[in-house]
Each structure stands twice: as C-alpha cells, then as structure tokens.
Image: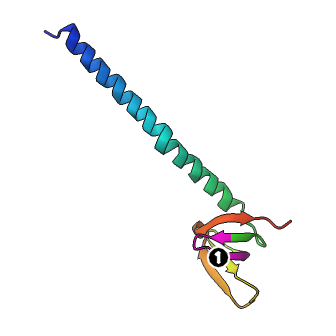
Amino acid sequence: MVTAGAMGGVGFWVVYAAFLIGLMYFIAIRPQNKEKKRMAELLASIAVGDTILTSSGFYGVVIDMTDDTVIVEFGNNKNCRIPMQKTAIVQVEKPE
C-alpha cells in the first residue's frame, strides 16, 4: 500500500523535473531557435552589391549568387573573387 508521504515525494520530483525542463527550454533551446531564425532571414536577404562580413573576418562585396554559394570580391583588387558558402556570412550591410 502506498502512503501519502511517498506520493508527496514523487509529486515533488515530478514538479522539480518539469521545472528543470522548462528552465532548459528558456536558457538553451529558445535562444538557439531565435538565432537560427535570425540567420536564416539574414541569408535570405543577401543581394548582389551588398557588403558582407565573413566568419573569418574578411569584408567583401557580393558579385554573384547561387542557391547556396556566393562569389565575393575582396579589397580593391578586381581579380580577387572567391566563391564561398552562404553559411560563412555573419553580417550584411546594404548599400545606401
């Protein structure tokens, strides 16, 4: 037979586990989903002529694009054009 004290202990652990799951959602999962959504919007907004910052710290101008790659021109040298993945872009500045 289960006593009232034993059920109270089980109820405590259920509430404690629910609290920890909720806390993990607000600390880890929710911010990660918001950042993923922000990056998807950023990558969708890239257009030819935008100035970008790559994950390696280089600034460049988008010259051409395909679905998952961009061709970026770095510096004043018109011969320095490098194809790279869109996921390597961390910041986009639109021309005024």
Q: Is residue 3 left or right of residue 61?
A: left
Q: Residue at x 67, y 78 (%)?
A: 71
* Residue 34, horizontal then vertical, whole percent: 58, 47
Q: Residue at x 74, y 76 (%)?
A: 61
* Residue 77, horizontal then vertical, whole percent: 74, 89
- Residue farthest right in this picture: 96
Q: Nearer the viewer, residue 81 or 9?
A: 9
State the SS at label 1.
Answer: loop
Q: Is residue 84 left or right of residue 6?
A: right
In the image, residue 91 lies in the stretch drawn in magenta: no
Q: Residue at x 36, y 23 (%)?
A: 15
Q: Nearer the viewer, residue 78 or 44?
A: 78
Q: Nearer the viewer, residue 34 or 19?
A: 19
Magenta highlight: main SS: strand
The quarter of the rendered structure image containing the C terminus is bottom right
Span colored in magenta: 53-62
The quarter of the rendered structure image containing the N terminus is top left
* Residue 67, horizontal then vertical, whole percent: 63, 68
